[in-house]
Image (cartoon, rainbow, N blue to C red):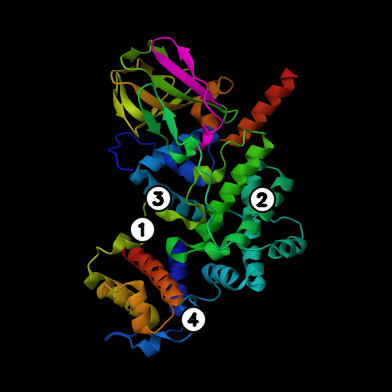
């Protein structure tokens, strides 16, 4: 709950304008090619994407500040060993850095992503410490790490069958650039390539906007149902 | 994989699985079930998100260290732009007359090979060395086999991988996840043959039962003190 309301605050704070009627014009959607314009730039998700897209060390430093002590605390809880817990901070944050380009916001928030990779590294560290056979690792057990939630059967089209009318009220809460993408793909049944051509944006930009939009919609719909 | 699972891990077990506090043996059994079972798959994702929230709400313990060297070392590393494909490993167990494809995690755990031992009553067993808290094994019941009635000293988890078996409490098919405690006496039998993966409390920890398994650290300490005494 905390996270959902945080996200909503973040949405409320960000500066885009809501466009109620009519399809957004292509011109409205071509501004900027960064996929993070709609998120609070200070959110964990924005920072993580900056680390992934731009190798931004400043953003990584902030994430490190926010999470290192949490990771350390998790290590202490599981191993009760200060040195191992420091090792865990190093291993987990190294993976945050290395895998940031693979982070996909539509598959979960940054906190869950960092928590699961911390849990997994901790499991492996503990097994190594106990000299248990290395036939299985955390990545074999929790196959969804690195955001591969499709393996868990949650696909992008999870909510497509929700009526578009119901979607509309959530849709208008998105930045216009993202609305345009969602409408082309889901209302007009365009392929990604066609939609990118219609909106005159690069395919990559379209895909990241779509991901962001779906992630946000999922959050909004989830909040509604609570 | 579509199947009509009738028996699932308890909510508590799935929560512990998502939080990462179970023994490796139990994690493997649950992971294999989750690969079969879409419902438990969704639940696991939900519990992971909840575990992350709990994690953020725990009181912070500050480490005294200065992390600037660590950060500098990390950001000098290259980043990954694609998901690494895992090596294919053993994915099938060849039974007498057919092959059974295994859930990913079990295929990996068994990739060093299996040694089958014949037990009484038409039962075969192949043990896996996973951890010190549990005894993990594949059990193959040949068609028409029946085990003697028995009771477990600790708890036993059984995941059906192929075929079916039944006991006094029900009939179990592929993907069913069954947990028995030391109170249950049962006498499994299988008419068509059955391949299972079973996780039992190790002899060292059985007196404490499954509760022991929920706390790997205590287990570790317990183990260590035991082995020190043994030396």
In space, the residues marked 4 and 3 are separated at their CA atoms by 31 Å
Residue A44 location in percent, x, y? 55, 67
Mark 1: secondary structure: loop
Badge 2 vs badge 3, beta-carbon distance below 8 Å: no
The circle on residue A88 is: 2
Please indicate, yes or no, whether residue A73 appears anywhere in the rendered image.
Answer: yes
Measure the C-alpha gap from mark 4 to mark 1. Answer: 25 Å
Task: Count residues near mark 2 (Cα–Cα under 10 Å), then give few for <14, some for 14-19, many for 20+.
Answer: many
Q: Chain of mark 1?
A: A
Q: Is residue B5 above or below residue A186?
A: above
Q: Are marks 2 and 1 on the same chain?
A: yes
Q: Is residue A179 visible?
A: no
Question: Tags 4 and 1 in contact by the CB under 8 Å rule?
Answer: no
B119 magenta-colored: yes
Residue A135 percent across, percent down from the top left: 58, 36
Q: Tell which subunit mark 4 falls on.
A: A
Label 4 and label 2: CA atoms lie apart by 35 Å
Which residue in the protein does label 1 denote?
Answer: A155
Quadrant in the rendering for residue B207: top right
Quadrant showing the C terminus of chain A? bottom left
Which label belongs to residue A152?
A: 3
**Viewer-proximal residue among B17 and B218:** B17
Answer with left or right where residue B69 lies relative to residue A116: right
Q: Nearer the viewer, mark 2 or mark 1?
A: 1
**Which mark lies nearer to you, 2 or 3?**
3
Residue B98 lies in magenta, yes or no?
A: no
The vertical placement of B9 against B78, above or below, is above
Residue at image mark 4: A33
* Badge 3 element: helix
Q: Which mark is residue A202?
A: none
Is mark 4 in CB contact (under 8 Å) with mark 2?
no
**Magenta span of residues:** B108-128
């Amino acid at each position: 709950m905390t996270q959902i309301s945080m996200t909503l605050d973040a949405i409320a704070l960000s500066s885009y304008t809501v466009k109620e009627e009519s399809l957004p014009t292509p011109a409205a959607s071509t501004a900027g090619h960064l996929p993070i314009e709609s998120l609070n730039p200070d959110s964990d998700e924005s920072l993580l994407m900056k680390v992934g897209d731009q190798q931004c060390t400043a953003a990584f430093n902030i994430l490190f500040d926010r999470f290192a002590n949490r990771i350390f605390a998790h290590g202490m809880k599981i191993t009760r060993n200060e040195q191992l817990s420091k090792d865990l901070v190093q291993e987990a944050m190294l993976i945050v850095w290395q895998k940031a380009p693979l982070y996909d916001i539509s598959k979960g928030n940054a906190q869950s992503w960092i928590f699961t990779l911390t849990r997994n590294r901790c499991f492996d560290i503990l097994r190594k410490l106990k000299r248990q056979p290395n036939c299985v690792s955390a990545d074999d057990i929790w196959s969804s790490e690195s955001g591969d939630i499709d393996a868990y059967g949650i696909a992008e089209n999870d909510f497509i069958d929700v009526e578009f009318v119901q979607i509309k009220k959530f849709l208008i809460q998105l930045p216009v650039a993202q609305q345009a993408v969602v409408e082309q793909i889901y209302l007009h049944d365009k392929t990604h390539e066609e939609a990118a051509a219609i909106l005159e944006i690069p395919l990559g930009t379209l895909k990241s906007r779509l991901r962001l939009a779906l992630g946000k919609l999922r959050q909004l719909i989830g909040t509604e149902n609570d | 994989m579509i199947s009509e699972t009738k028996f699932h891990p308890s909510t508590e077990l799935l929560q512990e699985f998502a939080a990462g506090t179970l023994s490796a043996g139990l994690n493997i059994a649950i992971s294999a079930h989750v690969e079969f079972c879409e419902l438990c798959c969704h639940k696991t994702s939900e519990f992971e998100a909840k575990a992350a929230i709990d994690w953020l709400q725990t009181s912070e313990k500050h480490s005294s260290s200065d992390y600037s060297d660590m950060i500098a070392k990390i950001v000098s590393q290259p980043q990954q732009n694609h998901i690494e494909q895992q090596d294919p490993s053993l994915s099938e167990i060849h039974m007498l007359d057919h092959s059974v494809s295994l859930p990913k995690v079990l295929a990996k755990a068994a990739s060093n090979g299996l040694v089958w031992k014949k037990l009484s009553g038409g039962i075969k067993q192949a043990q896996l060395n996973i951890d010190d808290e549990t005894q993990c094994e594949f059990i193959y019941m040949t068609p028409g086999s029946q085990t003697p009635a028995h009771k477990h000293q600790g708890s036993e988890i059984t995941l059906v991988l192929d075929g079916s078996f039944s006991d006094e409490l029900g009939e179990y098919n592929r993907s069913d996840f069954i947990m028995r405690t030391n109170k249950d006496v049962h006498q499994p039998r299988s008419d068509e043959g059955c391949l299972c993966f079973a996780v039992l409390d190790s002899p060292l920890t059985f007196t404490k039962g499954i509760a022991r398994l929920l706390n790997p650290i205590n287990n570790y300490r317990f183990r260590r003190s035991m082995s020190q005494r043994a030396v």
